[in-house]
Amino acid sequence: MKKTIIISLLSVCVSCATYEMSPVSLKNQLENSSMVEKKISLNALPIFFNSSYNALQLDSLEVFDKKGNKIYLHNSPSIEICVIDFKGEKFTMYFDTVVIENDTLIGSRSQFMPNIKHRVPFNTLSKIFI
């Protein structure tokens, strides 16, 4: 009896909700919340623009639960994002480290070692889970 109660309490404390969003929705939300950084090279012609969208700038994130209900999640360092490409390969990273730079999604797998990053071409993403 005690084991059942302990296991039940642990599962309630440890369980997490999973939400879904489309790659287009993520990009739109980041574009609308971030300032576009434009770096102009004066030495080279033509002039190139480097756009960068940072998830740290986002206050809340619009996602959908399993029933399709829209939910707004407050951005925090504890939110993990799992992106899946069209080949079925999964990449997990912390949401507050996510940046979109020139059609590449970049994010860190660890808060303690931020230099270890995933780099995924944005046009290969099929699903995003939060």
Image (cartoon, grey):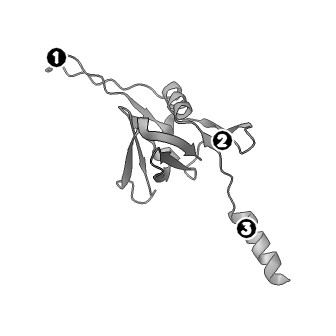
Q: Position of residue 110 (x, y in %)?
A: 45, 58
- Is 2 displayed left or right of 70 in the figure? right
Q: CA distance from mark 2 to mark 1?
A: 43 Å
- Of the two numbered discs 2 and 1 on the same chain, state the one appearing first in sequence: 1
Q: Which residue is at the far left?
A: 43
Reply above or below: 93 against 38: below
The residue positioned 49% from the left and 27% from the top of the image is: 31
Is residue 62 depicted above or below 13 in this figure?
Answer: above
Residue 73's disc is: 2
Which element carries disc 3, helix, strand or loop?
A: helix
* CB under 8 Å between discs 2 and 3: no
- Residue 11's label in the rendered image is 3
For the residues marked 1 and 3, what is the alpha-carbon distance in whole angstroms?
59 Å
Query: Which quadrant is the N terminus positioned in?
Result: bottom right
Mark 2–mark 3 Cα distance, whole angstroms, equals 22 Å
Q: Earlier in the sequence, mark 2 or mark 3?
A: 3
Residue 48's place in the image compared with 116, above or below, is above
Other residues around mark 1 within 10 Å, as few (<14) / some (14–19) / many (≥20): few
- Residue type at numbered disc 1: Leu
Q: Which residue is found at the position 47% from the left and 29% from the top?
A: 34
Q: Quadrant of residue 39?
A: top left
Q: Nearer the viewer, mark 2 or mark 1?
A: 1
Which amino acid, mark 2?
A: Leu
Secondary structure, mark 1, is: loop
Task: Say few, some or many: other residues with alpha carbon within 10 Å of mark 3 (under 14 / 14 to 19 / 20 or more).
Answer: few
27, 84: nearer the viewer? 84
Name the mark nearer the viewer: 2 or 3.
Answer: 3
Residue beneath the point at 72% across and 38% down: 68
